[in-house]
Image (cartoon, grey):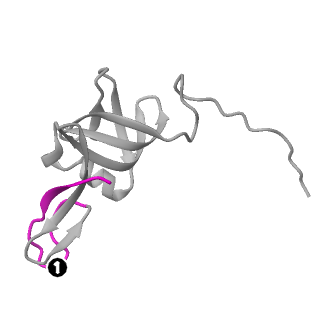
């Protein structure tokens, strides 16, 4: 039997951050062909975004390119943000990003074709609670 005793030392990757402390990142989405989408903050810092398949699909939606957004999540490393939720910003207010099929009355959180009729879904932004 092997018993290992010790301690784990965790340091913040960025000054002023605490590991696993939820953050809010606000900026504009910039998309370039062949590159992952980037958020540019008001301070001109760029962050590559990772997240679940829904967040990554929304970040790659060309309808959101250049839009102001806000992300809830965590700073994973310098220049990288792990997003849990994405919101668009209009007139200073947060909106949840959804996609709607008028034919089937189905709402989803990924852009693309409707899972039922295969028609194109429409971007809809709903006021966030």
Q: Position of residue 84 (x, y in %)?
A: 41, 50
Crowding at dot 1, Cα within 10 Å, few <14 / some 14-19 / many 20+, comes out as few
Q: Position of residue 40 (x, y in %)?
A: 28, 29
Rendered residue at 37%/35% (across/down): 25
Q: Tell me the magenta residue range.
A: 110-129
Q: Is residue 118 within the magenta segment?
A: yes
Q: Is residue 105 within the magenta segment?
A: no
Q: Quadrant of residue 34?
A: top left
The image quadrant where one finds the C terminus is bottom left
Judged left or right of residue 129, residue 98 is: left
Q: In the picture shown, does residue 16 fall above or below 22?
A: above
Rendered residue at 17%/79% (across/down): 116
Q: In the picture shown, does residue 113 fall above or below 47?
A: below
Q: What residue does disc 1 label? A: 116
Q: Quadrant of residue 122?
A: bottom left
Identify the secondary structure beneath mark 1. loop
Q: Position of residue 112 (x, y in %)?
A: 16, 62
The image quadrant where one finds the N terminus is bottom right
Q: In the picture shown, does residue 62 fall above or below 30?
A: below
Q: Position of residue 22 (x, y in %)?
A: 49, 41
């Amino acid at each position: 039997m092997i018993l290992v005793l010790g301690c784990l030392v965790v340091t913040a990757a960025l000054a002023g951050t605490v590991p696993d402390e939820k953050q809010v990142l606000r900026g504009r989405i910039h998309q370039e062909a062949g590159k992952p989408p980037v958020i540019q903050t008001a301070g001109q810092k760029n962050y590559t975004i990772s997240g679940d398949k829904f967040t990554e699909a929304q970040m790659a939606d060309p309808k959101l390119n250049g839009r102001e957004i806000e992300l809830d999540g965590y700073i994973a490393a310098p220049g990288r943000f792990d997003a849990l939720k994405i919101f668009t910003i209009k007139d200073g207010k947060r909106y949840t990003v959804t996609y709607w099929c008028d034919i089937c009355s189905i709402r989803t959180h990924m852009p693309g074709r409707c899972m039922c009729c295969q028609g194109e879904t429409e971007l809809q932004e709903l006021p966030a609670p």
